[in-house]
């Protein structure tokens, strides 16, 4: 189900981001929450309504368990995709900056930095990089890290869209819910 506290979490995040980014996050979060709300009720109805009346409780339990498992697996799979893309592409992105070759190799192979980038590259990690490299070079490396993260997100969103479209096609083959029969029939 959609988390009603998500907009509040985005509001707290906005204190650390630029206003334009916050508006984008808020708009996408609200539309995602509304879309999930309009989608889940019919989906639950379809699953529970397809089961025999005596088994509707079991069907509801299976539907809830499947929903939880799907969310957990989705986060794990998408997180793995982001981590893999960051690990594969960040070294190349750093080599494209003005960093000396040995420093670029060190930064490109730094697993801790990869993890930080895959988690969205928080402000603390950026500040640490600024202290370590100095301002002009740190800015280039931070830009490379942001572009690497956005490239990974783009891939994850593409995979998510393809997955949703495949699920939509598969849903066309789901049995329609039973209709109530008249008492005398």
Image (spheres, grey):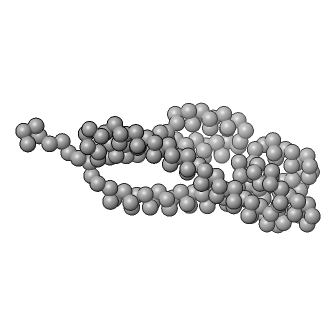
Asked if residue 183 lies left or right of residue 86, the reply is left
Question: Who's the residue at 60% across and 54% down the image?
Answer: 78
Q: Nearer the viewer, residue 38 or 166?
A: 166
Q: How many marks?
A: 0
Q: Give coordinates of residue 147: x percent, y percent.
A: 72, 58
Asked if residue 68 lies left or right of residue 155, the reply is left
Please say whether residue 80 is visible from this viewpoint. yes
Asked if residue 147 lies left or right of residue 35, the reply is right
Question: Who's the residue at 86% across and 49% down the image?
Answer: 129
Give above or below for 5 relative to 41. above
In the rendered image, the quadrant that contains the C terminus is top left
Question: Who's the residue at 87% across and 53% down the image?
Answer: 138
Asked if residue 146 lies left or right of residue 167, the reply is right
Q: Give coordinates of residue 39: x percent, y percent.
A: 40, 46
Q: Give coordinates of residue 40: x percent, y percent.
A: 41, 43
Question: Who's the residue at 82% across and 47% down the image?
Answer: 126
Q: Give coordinates of residue 59: x percent, y percent.
A: 35, 42
Q: Nearer the viewer, residue 91 or 127?
A: 91
Please say whether residue 45 is visible from this viewpoint. no
Give above or below for 140 relative to 53. below
Give above or below for 163 relative to 6. below
């Amino acid at each position: 189900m959609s988390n009603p506290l998500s907009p509040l979490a985005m509001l707290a995040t906005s204190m650390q981001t630029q206003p334009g980014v916050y508006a984008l996050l808020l708009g996408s979060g609200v539309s995602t929450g509304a879309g999930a709300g309009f989608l889940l009720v019919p989906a639950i109805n379809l699953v529970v309504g397809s089961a025999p009346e005596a088994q509707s409780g079991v069907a509801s339990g299976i539907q809830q368990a499947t929903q939880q498992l799907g969310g957990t697996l989705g986060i794990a799979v998408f997180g793995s995709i982001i981590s893999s893309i960051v690990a594969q592409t960040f070294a190349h992105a750093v080599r494209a900056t003005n960093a000396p070759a040995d420093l670029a190799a060190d930064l490109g192979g730094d697993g801790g930095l990869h993890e930080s980038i895959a988690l969205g590259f928080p402000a603390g990690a950026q500040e640490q990089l600024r202290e370590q490299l100095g301002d002009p070079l740190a800015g280039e490396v931070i830009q490379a890290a942001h572009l690497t993260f956005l490239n990974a997100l783009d891939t994850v969103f593409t995979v998510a869209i393809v997955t949703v479209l495949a699920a939509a096609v598969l849903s066309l083959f789901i049995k329609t819910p039973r209709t109530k029969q008249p008492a005398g029939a």
